Amino acid sequence: MKIEDLKSIPIGYRNTPLEPMPRLAAALGLMKEAAGADAADDASRCGLYIKRDDLTGLALGGNKARKLNYIASYALENGYTALMTFGGVQTNHGRLTVAAAIRCGLKPILVLKGQKPDYLSGNLLLDRLMGADIYFVDTAAADALPAAEQAAAKQRYTDECAARIIAEYEARGDRVLSVPVGGQTVIGSAGYIQAVPEIMAQMKAQNIRAKHLVVGYGSTGTFAGLWAGAKYYHAPFEVIGIPIEPDFRPVEETVDFINELSEYFEMGFTCRKEDLHLEFGFDSACTPAAAGSAADPAHVGYGGVGYNEPDAVTESCIELLARTEAIFADPCYTGKVFHGYVGLLKRGVIRAEDGAIFLHTGGAPGLWTKEHLDHMQEGYWSDEAKDRVHTFKL
């Protein structure tokens, strides 16, 4: 099947904005802040750009909406009545899958890795407001096993639980489509293959030149789709992946998946491991906001200290983007990718004069999860003078 023939339904906005980031460029010493009549023109040629897939519209936005346009269409065409997906307790993909299910009249089911939190916050609150059925799979007991056996045991138990859940729904007459973590399916990744001609059209319309597109590397469906789309459509930019956790998906698996995309959609190319560009980073690209934090910036790579674990370096990069462009990144994904984007600019791996696009994939509700709010109290709300917070009393 040709990618152009694949059906989708519009459950999220496309043609999300492609915007310049002149104030960021100025803060990094890459251009002087423009003023007066020349400001808009200079800003458009600052060389730093952001693709706003945080503005896809579905349930506060995010990149998974592009994948779900195709996944939901597949579900409806094939008679499914429920969408089930997996993720961490605060999964952004899960939130958007729930929203897509609701938009399409399907039952939303979430299977979440970990214990049920005592306190409802972040994406979980939004999931509950939308009426999702939520199942927590606690695999902590597997931590007592030898390290080499833990991952397999946890996956095996998760698979067993998922099978039980599906059986229960099917016994009641439902047909459940099981969507992998991050929507990482051939059908789902079509959303980002087709995002490439959209970006190219925007670049042409806005007279933007960019040699680099920096994106997160997690479940890899977004990265793989963009890489395949850039290859297929002869994009002028290289896709660079930033792992969003230290324990990232093996590159070989991503290569295999990209080749599966090429074969399924008759794209006519072969991907090799050496063709992929990933950047891990151990530089202190941003200044930590919380002095004395346990996170040493010299030893925190772009993927942070762990999946969805708070660290001061990621928080400082979130602060940098907010204070220069009034755009919010999240601490689990986009804050880390933005750390990589800034780090690559500072190291000269990418250059403003060549043009570089940062893909914002959403995730802002992660800022309001209890673990991250707790971690940010000291850095942003503990010292009135330092925090520039003032109180007048009668």
Image (cartoon, grey):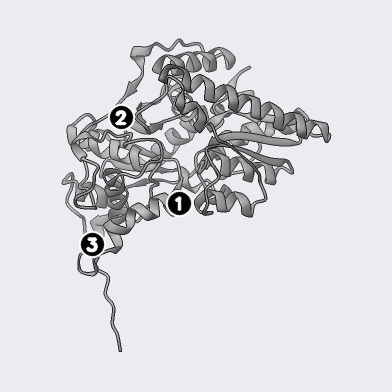
In this picture, is 74 found above or below 331? above
Q: Amino acid at mark 2?
A: Lys
Residue occupied by mark 3: 36
- Gap in angstroms between the C-alphas marked 3 and 2: 29 Å
Nearest to viewer (mark 1 / mark 3): 1
Q: Which quarter of the figure has residue 341?
A: top left
Q: Nearer the viewer, residue 200 or 179?
A: 179
Proximity of marks 3 and 2: CB atoms separated by less than 8 Å: no
Residue 162: horizontal and vertical position, in percent?
A: 65, 29
On the question of residue 31 being in view, the answer is yes
Give residue 369's mark. 1
Proximity of marks 1 and 3: CB atoms separated by less than 8 Å: no
Residue occupied by mark 2: 211
Secondary structure beneath dot 1 equals: loop
Q: Residue at x 21, y 34 (%)?
A: 299
Residue extending furthest toward the bottom: 394
- Gap in angstroms between the C-alphas marked 2 and 1: 35 Å
Q: Residue at x 72, y 41 (%)?
A: 107
Q: Which quarter of the figure has residue 180?
A: top right
Residue 34: horizontal and vertical position, in percent?
A: 21, 55
Secondary structure beneath dot 3 equals: helix
Residue 293: horizontal and vertical position, in percent?
A: 23, 48
Q: Amino acid at mark 3?
A: Gly
Q: Earlier in the sequence, mark 1 or mark 3?
A: 3
For the C terminus, the image quarter is bottom left
Label 1 Cα crowd, 10 Å radius (few <14 / some 14-19 / many 20+): some
